[in-house]
Image (spheres, rainbow, N blue to C red):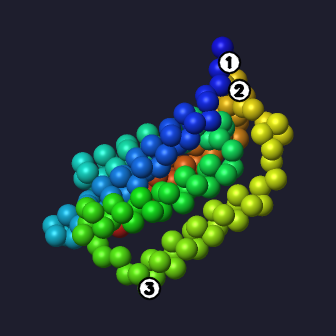
Amino acid sequence: MSFEIPVLAAYFGDLFATLLSQISYLLMKYAHIEAEKSQKSPFCTCRFFSALLCQAMAQVFHLGCLPYLPLILIAINSASGIVMGAMLAVGFLKERIVWRYDLVAFVLISCGCTGIVLMTKESESSQVTQTTEMVLAQLGSIEAMIFGSLMISVVVLYYILEGWFEG
């Protein structure tokens, strides 16, 4: 069964995944703020696990959308994620924008995106279209499974070491 996701649908799906990822960072920050008040570890809280779940869902959305997006739209979504993070921090964490630093960062992000767009020499006809079978074959490859296993091992080892050094 082969199907293609339209580029516009993949773009908005990836944009949603970017927003979901930024929300997970916000939840992690709230977990750290609560932990500072209670002098406990933020990693074993319900809020932090919700953030991890939110981050995992965002990455699944990214994996589903990225094969169908051109590099230009991926760069734009990455830049919009940074801007989303700044807006969420101002809106929810009551942080202030320091224009001396943030304006420079936003200009550099915009210049980087513009540079990627200008340097991309791909035409619509030269893009490799990924089919569902190709994506599933890549995700089911031995390299992807080894990478996933290593990442899970690192997270588990982190929690074991954190408990060992705290206790």
Q: Are marks 2 and 1 in contact (CB under 8 Å)?
A: yes
Q: Nearer the viewer, residue 3 or 126?
A: 126
Circle 3 SS class: helix
Name the N-terminal-most of marks 2 and 1: 1
Name the N-terminal-most of marks 3 and 1: 1
Please, is residue 30 above or below residue 139 in the view?
below
Kind of residue at disc 3:
Arg
Kind of residue at disc 2:
Thr
Please, is residue 49 above or below residue 134 in the view?
below
Specify whether 124 is left or right of 102. Answer: right
Specify whether 37 is left or right of 25. Answer: left
Q: Check the image and name the residue furthest to the bottom.
A: 100
**What is the x, y in percent for residue 149?**
57, 43
Q: Check the image and name the residue furthest to the top.
A: 1
The residue carrying mark 1 is 2
**What is the x, y in percent for residue 6?**
61, 30
Q: Kindly indicate the quadrant of the structure image that contains residue 115.
A: bottom right
